[in-house]
Amino acid sequence: METPETHYARRGGLHIGYQVWGDGEVDILDVGCGTFISIDEAGEQPQWRRYTERLAACGRVIRFDPSGVGLSDTPADLAELTFDAWVDDALAVMDAVGSTRAVVLAASGSSLPAFIFAAEHPERTESLVVVNPSARYTEADDYVFGVPLDLMEEFRAGLDPDRPDEESGDLSDLRLFAPSAADDPEFQRWWSRASKRGAAPATAAVLASIISQADLRHLLPRITAPTLVLHRQDTMAPSVEHGQYVAERIPGARFMALPGDDVVPYVGDLDGLADEIQEFITGDRFEPGPNRVFATILFTDIVDSTITAARLGDRRWTQVLRDHDALVRRELERFGGSFVKDTGDGMLATFDGPTRAIRCALAVRDGSGHLGVEMRAGLHAGEVERRGSDIGGIAVHVAARVAAAAATGEVLVSNTVVDVVEGAGIAFVDRGAHTLKGVPDSRRLWAVAGA
């Protein structure tokens, strides 16, 4: 799915940035994931993108940046940053896209304005889905499982960019909201960059303050829409008791505790979470259909193509590319591969089995050497989603990252491929664990030594 174009709705003198993913019959108003990160970052983060695509399989996903965040204008007076303003932003976006009624979806701190929306605008609320929600964050005499005030203050103080590092403590927002990804260097870099782009320090401080001080418990009994409350069992703040409290006080609400400790919905077991949301919205449990198949994915890439083209000249380079394309097609036919597409200086193909895919990669590598060019290749095996003549899915992304990690002349494969071809007479050299860009958890990679 292509990242949609950003549009703007008008709310008073402010422009509110929004995107629409998918075109289903049901409208899903995504009020937010609870962090001050712009919707513009969804297409850049593979897990968030997959979560969004799973939601778009249920209907038309309407996402927006509330005023003060990301693509939207910030009011001159930061005192105007309130949850009521957040709800007004949502209504302006719904009106701009012609949505009269929607499933209201929110996670973590964004569940607070979602409660206001559902309670005060039942005519616009088809149903309500909240993930790791809380109607009040801080502890009180009648709310003993709330977040301790000193812990909340420590977190809020950590948002100050002028605070010395030695005073920052151990409570980073990443370890609080996405602990399963906290040790992933690539995710760390993305989170830091996206957070800074999402809200300026003063704005982030105001938003954090209104979240920490909010108490919307009185609104819960007024919510009449069908409601699903999902909460991961081991989240630190808010803990699962917050979600149970919400479900007990919204009439007829359904509560489900899910495994995991990530507050951010698109980190951890995002598919398990999306399965429950999809079943609640559509009535159908997600099952891989005929458009999802298990395949071995092969990426090849000509190394230093720009330098080689400059060295050979345009005419000779054009002929080399033609010869290389013919080589690829010939070897794919020989080993039973299916050509998917050119990738610029390489190609993407799929195979029914990894043994033939490895032998094809070796043949293309050796043939390329005879043409005077060097190449590298990467293979991974997993489920892919057929998208017309193209394919997609996490497995394709992993295969591309494996290829990018390969050295010149190397055919690199994932541990999954090694496990499947055991006993096929193919030798491998262990290249150790690698952190692949945009892929959660490190992966052990192997270089093909011979077949």
Image (cartoon, grey):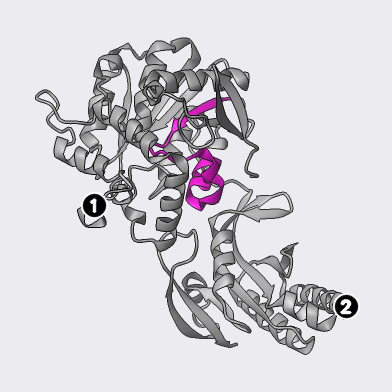
Q: Secondary structure at mark 1?
A: loop
Q: Left or right: where does residue 216 sit relative to residue 21?
A: left
Q: Which residue is mark 1?
A: 168
> What's the residue type where badge 2 is placed?
Gln
The residue positioned 61% from the left and 28% from the top of the image is: 8
Q: Is residue 91 above or below residue 164?
A: above
Residue 56 seen anywhere in this rendered image of the structure: yes
Q: Secondary structure at mark 2?
A: helix
Place of residue 149 in the rendered image (x, y in percent of width and height, measured from the top left): 15, 35
Cα distance between the residues tagged 1 and 2: 59 Å
> What's the residue type where badge 1 is placed?
Ser
Classify residue 254 by image quadrant.
top left
Residue most extreme to the left: 141
The residue positioned 66% from the left and 55% from the top of the image is: 391
| Start-end of magenta stretch | 26-53
Q: Which residue is mark 2?
A: 319
Q: Is residue 389 magenta?
A: no
Q: Left or right: where does residue 295 sit relative to residue 194?
A: right
Place of residue 438 in the rendered image (x, y in percent of width and height, measured from the top left): 49, 58
Please tell me whether mark 1 or mark 2 is closer to you in this view. 1
Q: Is residue 409 above or below residue 104?
A: below
Q: Is residue 146 above or below residue 295?
A: above
Classify residue 107 by image quadrant.
top left
Q: Is residue 40 magenta?
A: yes
